[in-house]
Image (cartoon, rainbow, N blue to C red):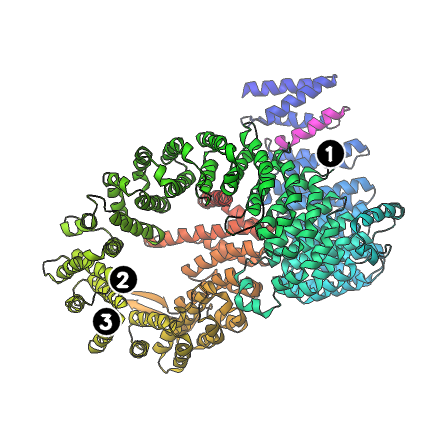
Amino acid sequence: MASASYHISNLLEKMTSSDKDFRFMATNDLMSELQKDSIKLDDDSERKVVKMILKLLEDKNGEVQNLAVKCLGPLVSKVKEYQVETIVDTLCTNMLSEKEQLRDISSIGLKTVIGELPPASSGSVLAASVCRKITGRLTSAIAKQEDVSVQLEALDIMADMLCRQGSSLLNFHPSILSCLLPQLMSPRLAVRKRTIIALGHLVMSCGSLVFVDLMDHLLSELSRNDSMSTTRTYIQCIAAISRQAGHRIGEYLEKVIPLVVKFCSIDDDELREYCLQAFESFVRRCPKEVYPHVPTIVSICLKYLIYDPNYNYDDEDEEENSMDADGTDEDYQGSEDEYSDDDDMSWKVRRAAAKCLDAVVSTRHEMLPEFYRTVSPALIGRFKEREENVKADVFHAYLSLLKQTRPSQSWLCDSDTVKQGDTPLSMLQSQVPMIVKALHRQLKEKSVKTRQCCFNMLTELVNVLPGALTQHIPSLVPGIIFSLNDKSSSSNLKIDALSCLHVILCAHQPQVFHPHVHVLVPPVVACVGDPFYKITSEALLVTQQLVKVIRPLDQADSFDASPYVHDLFACTLRRLKAADIDQEVKERAITCMGQVICNLGDRLGPDLQPTLQIFLERLRNEITRLTAVKALTLVAGSPLRVDLRPVLGDAVPILASFLRKNQRALKLGTLAALEVLVRSYGDAATPAMIDAVLAELPPLLSESDMHVSQTAVGFLTTLATAHPDSLAKIGGAILPELIALVRSPLLQGGALCAVLEFFQALVSAGTPGLGYLDLLRMLTGPVYAQSAALAHKQSYYSVAKCVAALTRACPEEGPAVVGQFIRDVKSPNSSDPVRLLALLSLGEVGHHADLSGQPELKAVVLDAFSSASEEVKSAASYALGSISVGNLPEYLPFVLQEILAQPKRQPYVESVWALLLKHCECTEEGTRNVVAECLGKLTLIDPAMLLPRLKGYLLSGSSYARSSVVTAVKFTISDQPQAIDPLLKNCIGDFLKTLEDPDLNVRRVALVTFNSAAHNKPSLIRELLDTVLPHLYNETKVRKELIREVEMGPFKHTVDDGLDIRKAAFECMYTLLDSCLDRLDIFEFLNHVEEGLKDHYDIKMLTFLMLARLSALCPSAVLQRLDRLVEPLRATCTTKVKANSVKQEFEKQDELKRSAMRAMAALLTIPEAEKSPLMSEFQSQISSNPELAAIFDSIQKDSSSTNMESMDIS
């Protein structure tokens, strides 16, 4: 401590030296001392340091002054509060000084101090008191209006402070407002501009009274409209407020927009520009309130988009060929300069109109068809705009339109909507010729920026409508080649041109390009040789695509590729050989060469083998091995049967060694490569090679990574068919791992199918010691040994499926095994696991083979229905159903007859239908659900006849029958197209009318069905949303009459019978966010989300998820409601559980807190959310509570790591 203060007092002494270099060095050393965390100053040192730094701010030498200002930052956080106030006082006084240099340095000093204060959300007392001190001095400096430069500095600092610390100055907001408003009429435009910035920051944190005063003042001044100059300022101010606090200005738009519309018609270009900018901010920031005015705004924008009074666009000019056009441009140059930017401000109006259209198009998905009718032709017509900046904005607006049209939403590709012919996509398709004609001319422009815009546009167009340019390739190719060959092109332009060409090549049929290959290949080959790595890398992608174009392997083709083979091969080889190039180029050169060999390998002659040797080198290199493995897979799978034999001996052992590496992508890639090699070159694989691979497989067959296991099993299956004699080796280590995999409860789907295929291939190969009975014993052994029953029910199903697969492959073994299983079920000595397995195996075998030759089978399975074990019963019902599928005429009548005879055993269409209907009024819900599923699946067999019948039962007097019928509809909906879809679409409305049913349960079931439709096939319900949503929202309300008290001994317990239906309603709302967002009134939706945030635990959890989703999908709407949404989150986080509660209560509350914090973190991703006073207050509450702060930190870390992962995946 003593040494530090001694060192500092030394520095202070040097600062008084007359030599400026001494002063400079001492100040620099002090700066580095202050930046150390460990430094502690006593009161005396503090005072001296502060005094000295303030003195140095007035130093004669500018460099010393600059350093002294920089010292203020670290100093503020190291000294006590009263010293900070001294600093601030002095700086404020100096700001009003006569000396200009001192004023400048003091204002920089104040900004530094404000920047160093802890943010308002931390609740720091120091920050608040310092800001209050500064505010008083600043408001008087602004109000005096003596010296404009002082005023400007004061306004700048005021804006900075309101931005950072606005919420801690609430009491000063009225006085700040009253000092700022007069400045809007200042004679100096710079003062007005900075006042507007300060007001923009003020409205983000001010209370509602101050906001009302401000808006009233602006509206009354606008209505008076004293002078054009102030009117411009007021409109700019309203636009700034809307940008900063759009969620607050919404309710004033009814008054504001008519005024702004009126001012658009006044002949003043600057005013028009500001009006259009105001429209743009309204559209982006007040989506709901601006909605009725959008048509007006669009028509104004379209009018001013073509507003160019000083220039005559000659129509004949359009038709001339481009060479003449280029010539005429030269002539115009001179005359254009005469009135260029000084007199002609109309370009600013056009730019503002284009930007406003961009905003409208980006925020109004539901108006797309209208935009294609009116906005699209207007924008295409303006691609010829003469001002480059305006042209870029016109292009950007059209890009936004294309992005909105991208058929990412399932409903855009719905078959029914496409037939109607006026979908956005079909309208765009009809405008493609206009777009191409307009772009054709722009692609030859000198301006690099314009050509880049054209390439972005073509890329997006092809992404939205693959194949759209099929007819227009001849008119676009010259433009692309012009940019690739142009010596003056920037590298970015070449990269854009190449990536555009790549997208076009990928999205169209190869034949379209055949007439142009001779002109495309030379410039692309030249780009592969370009010294700049990014151009090379992009050009290699194009080359790879060109190879597929000149010789497509998947279709017969008469195009002669031979003239181009050498050039494409040579340029790729040069890049493949180079060791000292960028990683991306290395990888793309390997992939491109893989494609060249795959498609043109038979034309390479003597060059082929040396190239394959290079591939081997790349396989041995850790950095390029994964790419080389993928390229090798491509070559090995080529239908040209390229000769890989010379390299197999070296390649296979290297590949085998990759299987023990940790990199998952490498394992999967290698297994795929090995499988293709064994399939295509099995005869060349030596036993030694195969043994090397087999040795690495056992660790890969594990339930910890099912995808890797599936790929490994797939490789073994290929090996069993291509190389059956190598299977003798798998008995030792591989088969036990595989059997363990079969018993894993996680085995299902693709992995299970792969295992079944392998067992069939294995038993068909006839390897000694691995015959049918050997394998059967391995699979079923543990169950029969009774020492170790299988741990999980799922394992019995998997083993039974394997038994059936083996039996299908060896049908002659079938009868004996089936006989054995029947004896096992029948035997009184069999344990339950043995019966379970035997019944399931009978079912699986009977599903694919007719077992009617087994006379005892029916009786044995039926007896199992009366077993004491529930699992054996369910296995018996599964077995009976599966066996019936094997021979319907024999077994189905038997099943039906049994159901009729024995009402307790509830496992041709007419009889099944009649039987099911008998049970659909059963009081037991489990039975009704099974009946409903059967009814639904049965309806799919003959929808035209059965769906109207189902509909008829909606009128049934029994609520049970109605609920069964509505549930049945749920089982007819799937995410795949089906024959029933058009019929369902016509009548699903009738089924959803049950949302008005008097019975609570029927309404709940209707919501579940609606949710299933919204999730799997939104097109069914999109048109019904207007009628369904009010009923849906109605079910989100808490109903007092459904809450009852139940006495449990001495305690009273509240039961809410309406909870399940509310939960179902909120689940529907969550689903609609994904599938029908464009059809929702988001503000109405938010009202109900807001209610849900205060509801029961389960519903809170759902609405927290919705909030997070909404923050990403429609941030501006959420921002408008932020204050109302934050309050319930805060209440959840601050709720305390009673001390004597059970453990589950504490766990639930913790989970709620975490979930609320996740929603909070999502809200904070909305730009400007943290500027809301309530939000910043909540943040400071979290940071001051250690428990909440810890949870919040961990959530933020999680979300940032998830973002990183999703970036990796993409």
Residue at (53%, 46%) from the top-left corner?
1180
Residue 1077 on image: x %, y %: 55, 62
Would you call the spot at circle 3 few (<14 residues within 10 Å), some (14-19), or many (20 or more)? some
Give the CA distance from mark 1 to mark 2. Answer: 90 Å
Residue 210 visible here: no
The disc label shown at residue 106, or none: 1
Name the residue type under label 2.
His
- Determine whether the residue tagged by mark 3 lies in a helix, strand or loop: helix
- As drawn, the label of residue 891 is 3
61 lies left or right of 574 = right
What quarter of the picture does the N terminus occupy? top right
Looking at the image, which is closer to me, 12 or 342? Answer: 342
849 displayed left or right of 252: left
The residue range painted magenta reads 58-78
Which-is-in-front pick, marks 1 and 2? 2
995 left or right, relative to 784? right
Q: What kind of residue is marked 3?
A: Tyr
Label whose residue precedes the other's in the sequence (3 or 2): 2
Pointer 1 with pointer 2, Cβ within 8 A: no
The residue drawn where x is 71% and y is 34% is: 90
